[in-house]
Amino acid sequence: MPTSPKPAGKLISFEGSEGSGKSTQIARLVAHLQQAGREIVSTREPGGTELGERIRDILLHKDEGQGMCAEAELLLFTAARAQLVRTVITPALKRGAVVVSDRYLDSSTVYQGAARNLAAGPVAAVNGFAVGEVMPHLTVVIDVPTEVSLARVRARSTGRPDRIEREDAAFFQKVRDAYLQLGKDWPQRVLVVDGTRPPDALEQQIWAEVQQRLG
Ligand code: Z5A
């Protein structure tokens, strides 16, 4: 008996400012995809591997990370990404799984490129080296005004903000503007949604788009 072909794997990344609602919407999308019977691999950046989680700690929390130059920051984020792609994402895609990643290469384009003012060419080159051919099939950018993002982060804060959370409002405004620009530059891949809408409405919108765009 001929066996039906395995569905091709898909990579969906979520992007946006901190507190924009990525984790909330990822959990909801994963539930829809599981109900649809797909194997799901849910991961995050920086992190998702043992090495990546160690790098995350240095990037966000450890004292050794203080005073880190922007170039070193870019290389650490992309080192964690390279490991995640080789050991988690590519094998999952080969099995036909849907991989949902909380942040991916666009975070480096936006945070290290636009917000830290590193030149776009080198950032794209390092990103390309880290991911190879593994580009997202769909990227959902959850857009919220900077003041909303900062207020949400403050409201749930329990301790000392991490190294990037300590940046000023101008930094986060650059982040937001750069994400909106990505939506204009890559309309086929990047879907920008309004993160000030209620979570249920956003969930429906994202699920409809995933079904329509990825089949
Ligand atoms: N970074 C970088 O610079 N370069 C890179 O290449 C990469 C990352 C990969 C990682 O932070 C940091 O690393 C990040 C970028 C940088 N720094 N910043 N800023 P992280 O992983 O610790 O956290 P995050 O990814 O920035 O976001 P988050 O804190 O996990 O937030 P979120 O997932 O987007 O939001 P949430 O947890 O779903 O929701 C936040 C709150 O809002 C919560 O109380 C919810 O109940 C509420 N919420 C959610 N949705 C709604 C709606 N629709 N309405 C009202 N309230 C809502």
Image (cartoon, rainbow, N blue to C red):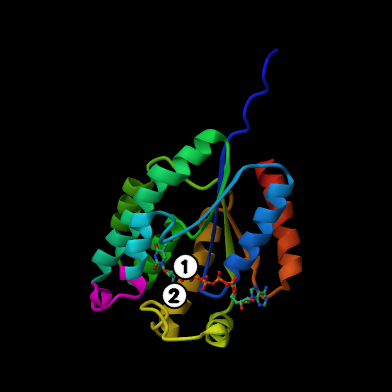
- Quadrant of res 123: bottom left
**Magenta-tinted stretch:** 58-68
Answer above or below: position of 157 versus 65.
below
Q: How would you rate the neighbour count of disc 1 (Cα within 10 Å): few for under 14, some for 14-19, many for 20 or more?
A: many
Q: Is residue 21 left or right of residue 204?
A: left
Hey, which quadrant is residue 7 in on the image? top right
> Does the Cβ of the disc 2 residue fall within 8 Å of ligand 1?
no
Q: Residue shown at 70%/12% (left/top)? A: 1
Q: Position of residue 176 (x, y in %)?
A: 50, 72
User: Is 155 displayed left or right of 130 in the figure?
Assistant: right
Q: Are marks 2 and 1 in contact (CB under 8 Å)?
A: yes
Please name the residue shown 41% across and 61% down the image.
Answer: 46
User: Residue lying furthest top in this view?
Assistant: 1
Q: Secondary structure at mark 1?
A: helix
Eyeballing the image, is 173 above or below 132?
below
Give how far across and how far down residue 204 sits, in percent: 75, 60
| Cα separation between marks 2 and 1 | 6 Å
Assign a secondary structure to mark 2: helix
The quadrant of the rendering that contains the C terminus is top right
For disc 2, the neighbor class at 10 Å (few under 14, some 14 to 19, many from 20) is some
Q: Is residue 1 above or below residue 104?
A: above
- Relative to 54, is 199 on the left or the right? right
Residue 66 falls inside the magenta stretch: yes
Residue beneath disc 1: 178
Question: At label 1, which amino acid type do we have?
Answer: Ala
| Circle 2: residue type | Lys
Provide residue 165's location: percent of width, then percent of height.
Answer: 42, 80
Most foreground residue, 53 or 183: 53
73, above or below 97, in the image: below
Marker disc for residue 174: 2
The residue nearer to you, when weighing 62 against 171, is: 62
Q: Position of residue 49 (x, y in %)?
A: 40, 54
